[in-house]
Image: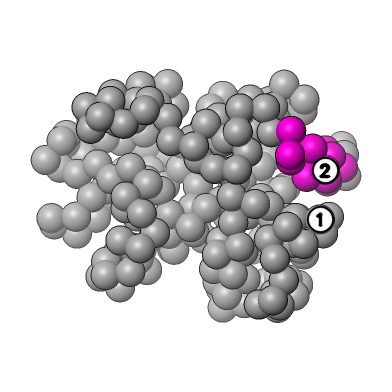
Amino acid sequence: MISYDEFKEMCISSTGYAYHRPFICKGSIEKANIFLVGINPATPISSNEMTLDDYVRLVMSYENFINYYKQKRINNNKPEFSKTRVGINSFVDWINENTGFSVVETDIITYPTKSVDELRPIPKEIKTKGMKNFLFLLNRMQPKLIILYGKKTVKYFNRLSKLELKSNLPVINKQLSIVDIEKNKLLGEVIYNDGSKGKVIGCRHFRQYGKDGKTFSLFRSNVIESLELFK
C-alpha cells in the first residue's frame, strides 16, 4: 500500500530537525482498517542517531521500533513505556484479538516532539509537511474507522477536515468534554478522493486507558458496533 520510497519521502525533515514518523503498525498493513490518531508522535529520532535509511527500516518494523523506543527510554532513566504507550499497546492488542484488524498508529502532524508544547515553535513548513503526510495516508489507505484520542486531537482533526477533506463533521462545542464526545457513537464521516467513506469517533487520551481498558468498556463497544457496519 505504501512503498519504501514513499515512506522514506514522508520521513524526510529539514536539516537539524528530527525525522517525521508517518505511522507504525503492528501486524499486517493489509488488515489495517483502523487509524488511531493523536496530535503528533512523542519520540524524536534525528540524523545524529541514525541515517535516514536506517530510520525508515526501523519505523517500518513495529517490533524493532518498539524495542528501540524502550531502550531509548531506559537510557534516559524512564520506565520502558509511557502511560500513553501502555494504553495504546493494550488497545491495539484488544482490537486484533476481537476483530482481526490491524491498527495504523498515526498523527495529524507526523513530526515528533517530546511533548505537544514543544510542537508550537517548530517551523511552519515542517508542521505543514506533517499534515500533508497524514492527509496522504488517509486518502491512500482509506481507513474504515478513524479514532481520535484526546479533545485537542478532535479539534485539530475537525479544523483540518474542514479545510482539506470532504466531511460532515459537526463543529465541536468548546464546552463539550472529551467524555461527552466519547459517548457519542459517531462524530461524522470523511469522504475520500474516490468517494468512499470513513467513520470518525473520539475518545479520551490513551494515557487513561491503562493495561486493561476497563474504564473504556463503553467506547470499545462503540468501536465494535462501528466495525460491524463494514462486514
| Residue 164 in which image quadrant | bottom right
| Residue 148 in which image quadrant | bottom right
Query: Mark 2 = which residue?
Result: 218
SS state under label 1: helix
Q: Nearer the viewer, residue 66 or 13?
A: 66
Eyeballing the image, is 32 above or below 26?
A: below
Q: Does residue 215 show up magenta in the picture? A: yes
Q: At x 79% / y 37%, what residue is drawn?
A: 217
Q: At x 28% / y 45%, what residue is drawn?
A: 44
Please state the extent of the stretch shown in magenta in the rendering: 214-226
Mark 2–mark 1 Cα distance, whole angstroms, equals: 8 Å
Query: Mark 1 = which residue?
Result: 183
Eyeballing the image, is 203 above or below 158?
A: above
Q: Nearer the viewer, residue 129 or 174?
A: 174
Query: Looking at the picture, how far across and down is residue 223, in whole percent?
Result: 78, 42
**Could you classify mark 2 by the number of other residues whose Cα lies within 10 Å: few (under 14), some (14-19), or many (20 or more)?**
few
- Image quarter where the C terminus lies is top right
Q: At x 42% / y 30%, what residue is drawn?
A: 81
Say if mark 2 contacts mark 1, CB within 8 Å. Answer: yes
The answer to which of marks 2 and 1 sits earlier in the sequence is 1
Identify residue type, mark 2. Answer: Leu
Identify residue type, mark 1. Answer: Lys
